[in-house]
Image (spheres, grey):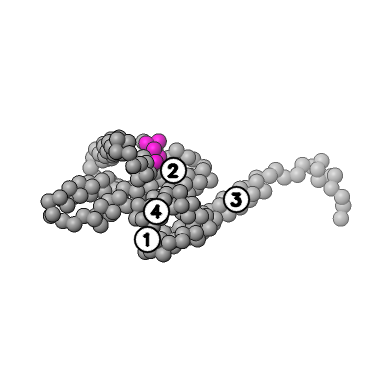
């Protein structure tokens, strides 16, 4: 499931970028297949927990992410003029991107045991999610530019050139994330050197005798 979560993140990216009708259909079918697997895995965990209230309290947010793909069906109501779904369609796309990002980050946490490795994988996920949001909401018209600016903002806290509401929000979020990344790296490196210093063996008697007298 951890590997599927990472693959699903790139599958959502492919759905966003592909323009060929057949390939797009294939990616959509694959996306629904992945979604069915995730739903089945979640229901299995709920069954093993005997559908207790504590399980739903811990995992209510996963239910929301699993229900996000159903927003796509509301687009069909536009033909019947029951509801305007332009904004809802964008909301569904944003929800799908965020859902894939959350699942990808959790999958990376399961697959990687070291803090540095998990942080690197988490940063890649954040860059991909931010770039997809910039591209999906037309803040950037080409994906390479969106990817470059998202990566720059994730590392430096600045770099997004557009001035719409989504870009401003992402700029703040990525700036906060970059501070957290560097703080975590500094703490990890400091703990590593401190552990080596504390764990170094004391000098032996011979080494003590070789020291010059004061």
Q: Dot 3, crowdedness within 10 Å: few (<14), some or many (≥20)?
A: few
Instruction: Point out the tag, 1 or 4, that comes first from the N-terminus.
Output: 4
Tell which of 41 and 104 is nearer to you: 104
Q: Are marks 1 and 4 in contact (CB under 8 Å)?
A: no
Identity of the residue drawn at 17% across and 48% down: 76
Q: Pick the quarter of the image with the C terminus.
A: bottom right
Q: Where in the figure is residue 163, as x and y percent of width and height?
A: 41, 64
> Mark 3 or mark 4, which is nearer the start of the sequence?
4
Q: Which residues are magenta?
A: 3-10
The residues bearing labels 1 and 4 have C-alpha atoms spaced at a distance of 14 Å
Closest to the camera, between mark 1 and mark 4, is 4
Residue receiving disc 1:
166
Snapshot quadrant of residue 25 = top left
Q: Earlier in the sequence, mark 4 or mark 2?
A: 2
Q: Is residue 19 left or right of residue 86?
A: right
The residue depicted at 15 percent of the width and 50 percent of the height is 79
CB atoms of marks 4 and 3 within 8 Å: no
Task: State the SS at label 2.
Answer: helix
**Mark 1 and mark 2 residues within 8 Å of each other at the beta carbon:** no
Q: Residue at position x 46%, y 52% from top?
A: 145
The reply to whether the magenta stretch includes residue 96 is no
> What residue does disc 3 label?
189
Residue underneath mark 2: 109
Q: Does residue 107 appear left or right of residue 152 in this picture?
A: left
**Mark linked to residue 141:** 4
Crowdedness near tag 1: few (<14), some (14–19) or many (≥20) residues, C-alpha within 10 Å: some
The earlier-in-sequence mark between 1 and 2 is 2
């Amino acid at each position: 499931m951890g590997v599927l979560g990472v693959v699903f993140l790139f599958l959502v990216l492919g759905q966003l970028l592909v323009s060929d009708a057949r390939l797009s259909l294939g990616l959509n079918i694959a996306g629904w297949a992945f979604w069915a697997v995730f739903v089945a895995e979640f229901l299995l965990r709920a069954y093993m927990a005997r559908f207790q209230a504590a399980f739903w309290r811990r995992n209510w947010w996963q239910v929301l992410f699993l229900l996000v793909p159903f927003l796509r069906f509301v687009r069909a109501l536009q033909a019947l003029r029951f509801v305007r779904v332009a904004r809802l369609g964008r909301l569904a796309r944003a929800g799908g991107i965020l859902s894939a990002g959350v699942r990808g980050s959790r999958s990376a946490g399961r697959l990687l045991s070291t803090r540095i490795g998990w942080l690197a994988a988490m940063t890649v996920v954040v860059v991909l999610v931010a770039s997809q949001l910039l591209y999906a909401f037309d803040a950037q018209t080409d994906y390479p530019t969106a990817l470059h600016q998202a990566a720059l903002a994730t590392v430096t806290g600045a770099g997004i050139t557009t001035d719409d509401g989504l870009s401003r929000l992402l700029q703040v979020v990525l700036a906060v994330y970059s501070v957290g990344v560097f703080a975590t790296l500094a703490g990890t490196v400091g703990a590593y050197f401190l552990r080596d210093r504390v764990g170094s063996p004391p000098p032996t008697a011979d080494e003590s005798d070789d020291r010059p007298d004061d």
